[in-house]
Image (cartoon, helix red, strand yellow):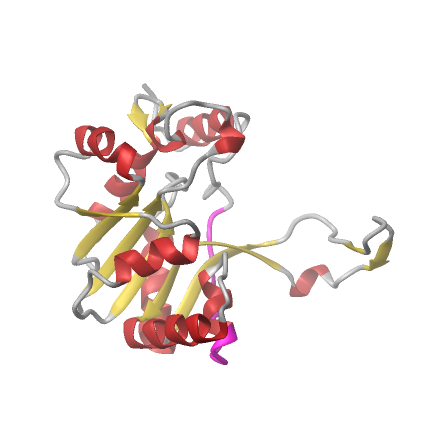
Amino acid sequence: MNNIAIILGAGSGTRMNCEKSKLLLELNGKSVIERTVEAFSKIDLISEIIVVCREGDLDAFEQVLGKYDISYCFGGATRQESVTNAVETIDECDLVIIHDGARPLITEKEVVDTIKSAADKKAAAVGVPVKDTIKVIDSNNAIVSTPDRSTLISIRTPQVFDFELYKKALSYAKEQGKDFTDDCQLIENYGENVYTVIGDYGNIKITTPEDLPLAESILKMRGDCK
């Protein structure tokens, strides 16, 4: 199969409180973006990797990712625009695999399991069961309901879709003037189901400063030390 991975790395990272891209920060001797790309480069089911970045970060990304066979495109103002920019560079493929560059602890099993599920069902995403009790609140922060935790899952990436289905869903959202922050929601909006694959709790997203020592602890637990 011809499956193409899109790794999103064009976010501003303002919550990390650093001047450079958070994806260039180091985790046990390797940058966040390198760890992410390295994980995908090892998977035989992936034919090509496209890294989406900000124009101002391209030189820095090329320096840390020089040994990998990847291509680049520039991001847009929103996540959906960034994915669209990458999709428009693809002539054809079977599955498109969309992953946050800020999730460097992704495991090969999670990626492969999600690809296999999408190959069978056309749309799949990795997620983990919710551990906490979740409350729904109103505009005054008053609790109005408590969903059954057994029916809740925290969706992460990768999210994998049949390429033709994804393009149709993108076009449909554009016609509606909608812009989604989650690719599963894009497919749901088109009226198709997305199926979940249970992943690893260690697949965290590097968003705020406290995520870095947590990620380093997970790496050490996995035996990946300096």
Looking at the image, the residue that sits furthest to the top is: 226
Q: Quadrant of the N terminus?
A: bottom left
Please tell me whether residue 197 belongs to the stretch shown in magenta. yes
Q: Position of residue 88 (x, y in %)?
A: 24, 63
Residue 137 image-quadrant placement: bottom right
Q: Is residue 196 visible?
A: no
| In this rendering, position of residue 9 left or right of residue 217 | left
Q: Which residue is rendered at x = 42% and y = 67% of the image?
A: 124
- Please report the bounds of the magenta region as a residue range: 189-200
Q: Which residue is rendered at x = 18% and y = 28% of the image?
A: 63
Q: Quadrant of the C terminus?
A: top left
Q: Position of residue 78 (x, y in %)?
A: 44, 52
Please tell me whether residue 2 belongs to the stretch shown in magenta. no
Q: Which residue is rendered at x = 50% and y = 61% of the image?
A: 180
Looking at the image, the residue that sits furthest to the bottom is: 191
Please tell me whether residue 208 is drawn above or below residue 194 in the rendered image. Answer: above
